[in-house]
Amino acid sequence: MILITKTFKIKVVIGGEGSFEKNSFLNRTTLVEEEIGVSFKSLECMVNEKDSYKLIMWDLNPAKDIFGFMYPQFCRGAKACFLFFDFSKFSSVRELPYWITLFKKTLGDEIPIILIGTLPEPKIQEVFEEDIQKMIENYKLYPEYFTISNESNKKRKKKAIFKNLITILDPEIEIEKFKIISPCEDPAFIAFFIKFSRCPICNRQNHERYIQDLYYSQDDEEKSKLRDYLLNLIEDSRFYPQKYSNKIKVGIPCCSCYRLIFEN
C-alpha cells in the first residue's frame, strides 16, 4: 500500500460572484446558500501517490449586505482564497475589490488570491483579458487566472487550479502525479469500502485510507488490476454453490495481518 509521507489540512475561503458554473465546480447540487452565510465543501488532493492535501473550502454567501459582518470570522485560518467572477457580467468584476480588500485585511497582504472566471454559454462576454490583467496588477494577485467555460473543460481546469494551489502553498514540492478525490461523493467507492471495510482474517476495521489508496489507483497498473480482480471475484462468487461460498472469505487484509502474512 501507499505510504503517506505528508498529510495537510488546508482551509480555502471562496468569494465572488455566485453562478451555476461555480456550484458545478464545487460539485454542489443547489444554488441555495446556507442560511448561516457560508457553505462547506471538502476534497483531497493526492500528490505523487504519497502526499495528502485535504482542502476544506468555505464558500461565502455573496449577499454581503446580509452576511458581510460575519465574513472576517469565516476567513480566519485560511491559507488561500478563490475569487470567482462571471465573464458575462461586468458587474461581477466591479465586486472584486470588495472581496480582495476583505481577504487582505483579514488574512494579510501576502495571502494568495486566485481569480476564477466562469463563462456561461451562450451568454455574451462582457469581461475581457485586459480587465482581468488590470485587476491582477493593481491588487497584486496571483498572476495566473483560470477560466471555466463549459462542462468539457471543467475537470481539466479544476485539476490545474488545485495543482497550482498546492505548488503555491508548498513551493518545494515537485509534482509528478496528481489527482483529486472526493470519496464521500462517489457511490462506487462507498460500495467498495462497505464490501472491504473489514479484514477477512481478524475482522478488524480497515483504515479508510488503506481502502481508498487501493480504489483510486488508476496510475498504478498492479493495484488497478488487484482492485478489478477483487470486484470480479465478488461478482463471480454469486454463482458458487452455497456449500463452498459459505466457506470462502474475500477481502483485503488489514495492515497488521498483511505484515504478518507477507513480511515474515
Image (cartoon, rainbow, N blue to C red):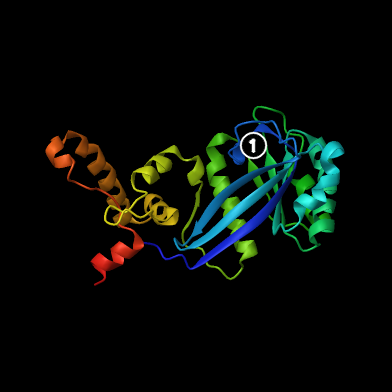
**Foreground residue, 241 or 7?**
241
Tell me which amino acid carries mark 1.
Asn
Q: Is residue 20 left or right of residue 45?
A: right
Within the image, what quadrant is residue 31 found in? top right
Q: Identify the residue under disc 1.
A: 23
| Residue displayed at 56% across by 35% down | 151
| Residue displayed at 58% across by 71% down | 172
Q: Position of residue 241 (x, y in %)?
A: 13, 35
**Foreground residue, 108 or 253?**
253
| Residue displayed at 66% across by 38% down | 22
Q: Is residue 217 left or right of residue 97?
A: left
Q: Is residue 247 left or right of residue 43?
A: left
Q: For residue 134, say whether it is visible.
A: no
Q: How many marks can you see?
A: 1
> In the displayed image of the protein, which residue is found farthest to the top?
122
Q: In the picture, which quadrant includes the N terminus?
A: bottom left
Measured along the vertical axis of the image, is residue 91 above or below residue 173?
A: above
